[in-house]
Image (cartoon, rainbow, N blue to C red):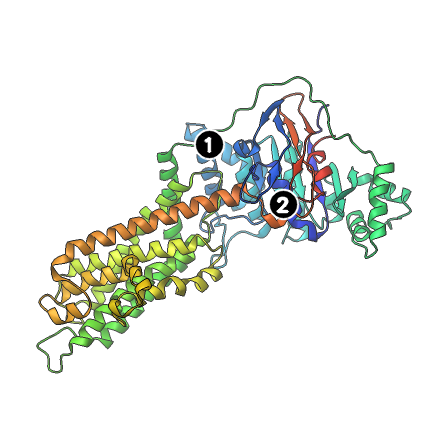
Amino acid sequence: GPAPRGAHLHLGPVRFRQDELAELNALAGRVRRGGKSRTEITGEFRVNGHKIETSEHQRLFGYVMQEDALLGTMTPREVLRFAARMRLSIPPDESIEMLIEDLLANMGLSECADTFIGNDLIKGLSGGERKRVAVGAELISNPQITFVDEPTSGLDTAAAYDVISVLKQLSEMNRSVLCTIHQPSSEVIHMFDQAIFLAAGEVAYHGPPGMIRAHFAKLGLQCPQDYNPADFVMFCIQAKSGDRASSIVRGWAELGDVRPHVRDCGHSSPLPLVPCRKGFLTELATLGEREVKNVVRDRATLTARFGTTFFLSLTFAFAFYRVGDSTAEGYDLQSHSGAITMLGITALFGAAEPMLLAFTSDALSSCDMYGTLPYFLSKTVVELPLLVVQMLLMWCMTYWSMGLHGSFFLHLFGSWLIAVSGASAGLIAACFVRDAKQAMEVAPGILVPQVLFAGFFVKTASLPAFMRGLQYVCCLKWGMNILMVNEFPGELGLLKANDVEEDDLAVYCLVMGVIFLGFRLVAAVLLTAEHGRSTLEAPASAFTASSELAVTFKFGRSDCFRQEGLLHGPAPSQLRESAGAALCR
């Protein structure tokens, strides 16, 4: 039968949070058959009578996650414009701008359309405004079905009401919205057309919020008039006595308006067209433009990057003043080489640590808008010239004050190779972490071995045999070889002590290029794998008991949904009734 369009509310105890996330992942196509989460889906997903894999058609659905990944340096207008360029096939810019202005007005964002989103370092939008921007970015493609995970988390009552009001307006435009919420206010819960409560993995109630009191009164559980019915039901479900939750579930099965598991959708209709992803060059250009704006506007990060380089360079300029002047009284070759070594280490750390901090913040954001490769390349293209400027600042402050006599431009080139290779090593580490705190904890494990195997403190020949091979992936070693050959031509004793051959300068440059490309390739592969895991895999911890799930969606005038089939594996029985039933009536 036809499915009711509207807003549907899904509630359950906090301990079932992972179960609800798994549920949304399955419906939105973010759980893949035979994926790494070891979840086996044996049922069927159908759209207009056509069997599909939702993981291959997830662009048909909108999915607003609880934690948005909006860049703090962008404005709501730019976020929507970026989403439109990535998701829509509207050539004229005028049409896109009209759509954006209309959506900003409908989302109540017109007054803050040109305000930065904001983050911990940049003052920006309120929590409710951020959530509405995240919702708007999903609605730009006009999805038939929108899944929203915890849209009111972290918001006050007024902000939560505003967000749900937007979703309610969407549901009134012949669209379906499914939300998971743990603690809705009295005003919020009555804005939904349907509410689903879960207890111990089973449906405790599924129906209009206005009928909650009447149904539970039949079970002998009288909800006081001045109580929020959602809070009352949640207290009853989470009572220490397991008998009460069981009796509530039995009461719904016996007295509730229980819907059949399978509902006939009638004849098949044409399968909706899956929006095509934009071309590689379009994605690269759009992402590159966004990245340039992000770098230029993030003044705190720029100040920290170049401020640290300036301070260290100034310190070295005084500490190693005229250390390279071999005609000066008291000239010391060891101090001279030590100055070059410190500059090389500074180039390594000064490039790797900012990459770790910057890349983790948005590496997996907007995963269905663009491909991993254009995203990866856009950051690389912007990063390379930035490192040139950073290294140029360092050498301009130290080269003449230290009295160095090697080629200035070869020193600049060698330190730049160290920097880009070090940033690539940091990039590999960033693929394994999700926030800045983890990044800073991982950084020493990536960077300190670079110093150890560079040959400054211990000769490579003195290392255990099984560790000597690590020198070939040590970018600092080969980069320092370039700097040493450039600064100490003819100093055969020093060069030999550091395993440097004066005639192999071209080889060292080639090795650095190979290390840079190799590290970038490894990082790209890791990011692609993490991309697929985060967008298509529900976490294994989300599944705790066997369950059933499969849903059929139908678009068009006689829209309908039906639940048929099974989702087998270590999954919560909580999925059995709620996922498909939340959308079909």
Q: Which amino acid does label 2 sit on?
A: Leu
Tag 1, which secondary structure? Answer: helix
Q: In which quarter of the image is the C terminus?
A: top right
Residue at x 18%, y 60% (from the top left corner) = 482
- Callout in the foreground (1, 2): 2
Tag 2, which secondary structure? Answer: helix
Left or right: residue 555 versus residue 225 is left
Residue at x 24%, y 51% (from the top left corner) = 513
* Closest to the observer, 326 or 101: 326
Farthest top residue? Answer: 267
Report x, y in % for residue 46: 62, 27
Q: Quadrant of the N terminus?
A: top right
The answer to which image quadrant residue 289 occupies is: top left
Which residue bears the numbered disc 2?
A: 21
- Which disc number belongs to residue 96? 1
> Is any atom of residue 406 visible in this view?
yes
> Is any atom of residue 299 visible in this view?
no
Report x, y in % for residue 578: 72, 38
Q: What residue type is labelled 1?
A: Ile
Report x, y in % for residue 277: 44, 32
